[in-house]
Each structure stands twice: as structure tokens, then as C-alpha cells.
Amino acid sequence: MDDPVLIVGDRVTAATREVLEAGVSLGMARREAEALAPFATVLVRDPGEESRRFEPVVGLIEDLIPRVEVVAPGLIFVPVAGAVRFYGGEEALAKRLAEELNGLVGRDRGGQALIGVADGPFAARWAAAGSEGGRPLVVTDTIDFLSRLDLTALREGLEADELIDTFRWLGVSTLGDLARLPRDALATRFGNHGLLAHRLATGEDRFVDPREIPPDLAVDASFEEPLESLDAVAFASHALAERLLRALRVSGVAPHRVSIFAEDAAGGSRERIWRSADPFTEKALSDRVWWQLRAWVESGGIPGGISRLRIAPADLSDEGRQLGLLQDETSRIDAERALARAQALLGPDGVLQGRAQGGRMPQERVAWSRWGEPLSDRERDDSAPWPGATPSPSPALVPPSPESLEVEWDGGMPSRVRLGTRWEPVLTWSGPWRLSGRWWAGEEDADRYQLVTSVGAFLCVVTGGRAFLAGVYD
Amino acid sequence: MGLEDVVTAVPLIDLADREKGFLQLRPGHVTELLGIPGTGLTRLGLRLLAAPSQTAPVVALDTRGWISPEAAWETGVVPESLVIVRCAEPRIWPKVAAALLEGVRALYAEVPAEAREQDLRRLAALARARKVAVAMRPMGRGLPSGVAHLRLRALGVTWEGADQGHGRLGRRRLMLEASGKGASGMTRRFEVEDEGSDFVRVVSDVVVGEARRTVG
């Protein structure tokens, strides 16, 4: 396609070269991207359609190597231990795959397959990203390969941007630097995420012990009248996904990989494994089952319709992003739906999350971000000492900007404060504490007081002869 | 002998433990925090979210745009779990509150003075149905009867630490009165001592009396 195109969900997921050159980047908010590239045709991402279009690629790989794992349309992991022996080595296998795939994607889509071979999916994914000119990158020393990767490589495997920022702040810039740190110390300081980061950095992505899967955890359904219409397939896939997860929840486990098996009216069968970084939720699983079945049905892979459908957890291990020990995944998903509804009622600025940052005044010490968007960068380093910062306890109520406050002074000491229509005597106070302003930016020095009245305590700032309310100790 | 020594004495712990239960939100129940601004009820309301925030996202519904998450973090609320929802428009406040009750496990909500009785009753019913633990802080008069399972009314607050320009605010003592079904239909008074950390000391009224007599 020659026209400039922007593919979006909530954020930019893909763009043509011309659009990227206009300053758009992947992951950028949709509105921002549209403003930067008004000339681009904007298309909304359709994972189902992507899945359908990707199906020939999966099918081709499956013909060469059985048991592929589909992570998302566009990304597949293939265990190659057996195939390597069959094809006579990793190089030969990768070359054969590249030829077949380049024939397909080059012919049909004008694209190029990226292939990487390494010990473990994480390393293989980055090896594929590093392959050039359609030539596969076969990594012979995975540890060495990983050690040279920048720390940002962890973003996809970990989804813990803050942890990565912390590592960088500590002087760790590559996975090699991270791998050299003691694992125990990382686990103690950063918990599961720290442990998983170290595992990935040391190439131990594969060395997890899959939990044994009891055979009765699989769910299946047989249909006397084979399902041919997409509506019927959608309904069946949703019901089956729901059944599987309900049964698994009772056992207290959640799958990261599932096997989807379909039998056609003539007795033929297809099977595909889907993988997710997060444990599958009902929606995520039923989406993937639906995408897969739709792709099979529309590509004619299920002649005569589906007569039997089976979904089985393929892995209940701790691969992928782990939840904290006490975290409740269902609660998180329910809460996200509720917050999205609240955001629809109030607008994006009505639902916020804060994170600590440095500063001397309470207003400065919180970096606000819209909920659902990446956390905003800290304007001030919160690990710096900040001498003269207002001490804890912090006021629970902080006006967005200091509000005018009437204070009566007696010999330089606060004696009364006006609250609404009443004057309240100041029972006691602490301060003044000097707050030196940035004189070069035209800011004046100020004095801070904590005023205690019979109805509560207040943080007050006096500058230029006027008093302002900076917080209420409510 | 200080107050701290007395409340750790074995026969008195049970008395204070009973009041500590008032400082825990219960799924499906509304706890009302009643009192004028400045008494420390915002901090107390945020503190009630600390336990639920360990396992799931929690929400503070802010009608004034003034709630500071920093105070919540100090009381033990998990920073990543706290979401602040700002709703200054009383007209849509019931819709926003209802939307939140549909999905979150724990909610601290400031209630605008204009909130209608029928909306509050519906919200309480929704909290019961969805088993959401709710703390409501009315900005005007108290909640209609029957809405709150437990009412905590602030009777007064005293501060220690600041002294005519010296020191700084340190320990706060908040005297509360618990009433309603959650207090077994009785009215109980107790004191909450808060030193700005994630720990509070709860002293039952009876214990305070004992302590003062002992000290005296």
C-alpha cells in the first residue's frame, strides 16, 4: 500500500514509513499521532482480521514444524529441538523457514519475515528483531547475545517500566550488567519482577518447571450439527472459554498458554497453541479462540464445519508476567472496567493516578497521570534529600494551587485565622520555616506555618505579606 | 506510666481490639465518616483503603479536587493500587459512584451536599449487592438513616508536637463515636492516635479512663 497509513487502537500500533518520519512513534496516543500526521489514513486495529491474515503464515510454519505457539498475530514461537535434527541443524532449519516465509509474505504482502533462533523465547524474539535483509539470526551464545542488549529489551517481557527506570538510575544499562547482580539481592529488593528480570537477563527464560496439568482441566464440546456460521462459532468459543477459566479458578490457577483443538465434520483436526504474557482472562481467551476458529473457518481449514471443539491449558507455569503474591487478577479487571466507565463520564482528566516525586511543598510532591496512560515522568527526583521539605504527616487535602487565607497576626505571631465566615483562634503553631524561592525565576521567598485551631490544623504559606492555604490536615 | 504502657496490658487489649474493628471496611457495608473538615476524617477514610489496596485497585472519589495521595501512601495504601477520581459536578456524582461500585472492591467517597436521599439509598443497595467496602464522607449533613452500617462521628481532635512556633505537628488524637448496626446498636467512644505513619493506636474510651486514673 503506497498511501500513508496509521493503525491505531487506543494507541498507535503500526504506521507506514512516511508517517513515522512525521514524528509518530509506536505506542503514541492516537490523538497526538493524528495531529502529527493529518495526511495519514487512520485505520482502527482489528485483531481478528490480523489473525485471519496471519493464518497462512502459521499454517506454513506448522507444515514444517509442529506445535507452534502463537503469541499475537505477527509473533510466533516455535520449539525447534526436534526439527533441528530432522533438517540437519539450526542454520539449515532457519534458512528453510526463511525461504518459505519470504516466499509467502514477500509474494502476498510485500513484507519480510524476521527469524531468530536462540535458547528461549525472549532471546529468540530479540534475535528476530536483529535479523537483517531477510536472513535469519542464529544465536550460538545466548548469554553473550543477551548481555549486549539494552535494558529496554525487558519492557516486552516484563511490563515494568518503573523497575527498568530504577535499574537505569542505579547504573545498570544492559542485560549483561543486570545479569552480574546477585539474584538474591534483586529478589529481596524488587520482588517477583526483579527475579523475573534477572532470569530473562541470564537466559533462563525456558528453565521454568511447568506445573503438571491434570487432564480433566480441558473442556470440550461436540456438535451434532457441525458449526459452519461464524456467529455459532463465536458463541461456542465464548462459552467454552468461560467454562475453562471458571474450572481453573476453582483450582486457583490461570493459564499462560492454551491449546485450541477443532475437529471437522470429516474427522480431520487442527490444533494451535496460543500464548499470553499475562494469565488469560475470559475476554482475552474467548477473543483468541474466536480469532483462531474464524481464521480456520474462513481459510477453509475446517471443511464441513466444526464438529468438536476442545480448549486445554497448555501450561500453568509461572512463565510470563507474574502477579504479586496477593494480587487478585479478577478484581483488577473488574476495577479497570469500572474506571473506564467513570472516565467516560468524567473525561480523561477525571481519573488520575499519582506517584511520588521530589519537592518541598505538598503540591509538588505528586506527579499526576491520567489513569490508563503511561505514568508521567517525575519532574523532581524523589530519592534526593530535599532539605526543608514540609515534614510528615502530610496534609490529606491539598489545593491544586495555594488559596488565599486571612490570618491575623499579633506581634509577628498568628493569633486568628478566618475559616469561612468565622474567625478561629490559633491555639498553637509551628514555624516559620523558610522556603527559598528561585530568585532567578522571579519567585519570592516564603515562610511556612502549621496552624492549629480547635477545628483542625492547616499548612499556611506567607509570601509578599499575604497568607495562603497550602494544605489541610484533615 | 504512659498511656502506651497501659494499652498494651493484657486485660485492656480486648477492649481496644473491639474498636479497631471499626477501622476496617467490610464488604457490602457502608461506613459513614461524619465531621467537619479538619478533624482528620479524610486521612482516616484513606487509611481504610490500606488493607484492600494490598490485593486490588481502590478508589478515592474526590468532589473538591483536593485529596492528596501522599497522605494515603503514608497510611499504608499501595501507591500503584490507588486511583483518584475527581467529580466536582454533583449532578453526575451518583452515576460516577455507581459506575465505580460496579467494579472496585473498596471505595472512599466524598458525598456532595446536594446528593439526593434516593440516590444514596440506591448506592448503598448497590454496594451490598456487589459486596463493595465503602466509606462515605458527607460534605453536608449526615447520610440518611439506614444507608450506613456504621457511623463514625468525629467529636474532636487534638494535636501534639507544635508549641508556639517550636516543633512541628506530630501526633494527632481523634476522638470518635461509633454507632449504628456495625456497633451492635450501641454508641461507643474511642480515640485514634495517629503519628503520620501506617500505624495507628486505638484506645477505647474505657481504656482512656483507666489510663488517666493510673497516670493520675
Image: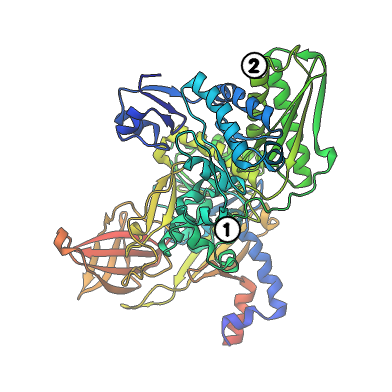
Q: Position of residue A410 (x, y in %)?
A: 21, 73
Q: Is residue B197 above or below residue B31?
A: below
Label 1 marks a residue whose chain is: A
Instruction: Indicate the amino acid at tag 1.
Output: Thr
Q: Is residue A465 visible?
A: no
Instruction: Indicate the amino acid at tag 2.
Output: Ser
Q: Position of residue B71 (x, y in %)?
A: 45, 60
Reading the image, the residue beneath label 2 is: A299
Q: Is residue A95 visible?
A: yes
Reading the image, the residue beneath label 1 is: A202
In the rendered structure, the answer to whether residue B108 lies left or right of residue A328 reads left
Precedes in sequence: disc 1 or disc 2: 1
Dot 1 and dot 2 within a common chain: yes
Looking at this rendering, what residue extends furthest in the front direction? A88
- Who is closer to the viewer here, A249 or A179? A179
Do the residues under discs 1 and 2 have CB atoms within 8 angstroms? no
**Does dot 1 land on a helix, a strand or a loop?**
loop
Q: Quadrant of the N terminus of chain B?
A: bottom right
- Who is closer to the viewer here, A7 or A100? A100
